[in-house]
Image (cartoon, helix red, strand yellow):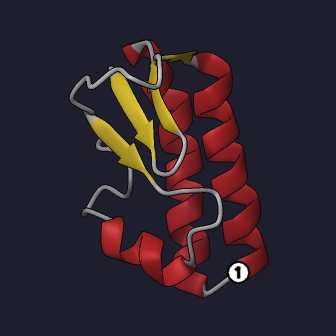
Amino acid sequence: MIVRIMGEGQVRLDDGRLTALNELDNELLTEMERGDESGFRRTLAALLDAVRGAGTPLPDDSLEPSELILPSPDATLEEVREMLSDDGLIPG
């Protein structure tokens, strides 16, 4: 799976990592619903770090279609809210 982190680039990520990422995504959703800005910041950073850590960066000039698009680390709660689907940022 190709994942784009807005403002950073793309990484190739094994589909088997989605379960762990979904746990962070669910936590992020809960914090957003509560309006917990500090929790939101912490969990968004953890989610992006998990993707970076588990993924293999693609070259900057690579134009692979992204199957998943995640917000930039400095995205606001409102910006992330606009990106959400019923399943959160990560389907499943």
Instruction: Name, please, the residue furthest toward the front.
Output: 61
Q: Quadrant of the N terminus?
A: top left
Q: Residue at x 57, y 62 (%)?
A: 28
- Residue 77, by quadrant, is bottom right
- Give how far across and how far down residue 63 sits, in percent: 27, 25
How busy is the neighbourhood of tag 1: few (under 14 within 10 Å), some, or many (20 plus)? few
Is disc 1 placed on a helix, strand or loop?
Answer: helix
As displayed, is residue 75 above or below residue 68? below
Residue under label 1, please give it: 37
Q: Is residue 55 above or below residue 83?
A: above
Q: Is residue 52 above or below residue 22?
A: above
Front in this rendered view, residue 90 or 72 = 72
Q: Is residue 6 above or below residue 12?
A: below
- State the residue in front, 26 or 7: 7
Residue 4: image quadrant is: top left
The residue depicted at 40 percent of the width and 75 percent of the height is 81
How many marks can you see?
A: 1
Question: Going by the picture, which residue comes out furthest to the left?
Answer: 65
Q: Quadrant of the image for the C terminus?
A: top left
Where is residue 69 shown, x and y percent of the image?
A: 36, 46
- From the viewer's perspective, tell me whether residue 48 is left or right of residue 14: right
Type of amino acid under label 1: Glu
Q: Nearer the viewer, residue 22 or 44?
A: 44
Q: In the shown orientation, is residue 27 left or right of residue 26?
A: right
Which residue is at a point 61% across and 73% down the rendered structure image?
31
Determine the residue positioned at 58% across, 31% down: 51
- The image position of residue 49, as x and y in percent, is 69, 37
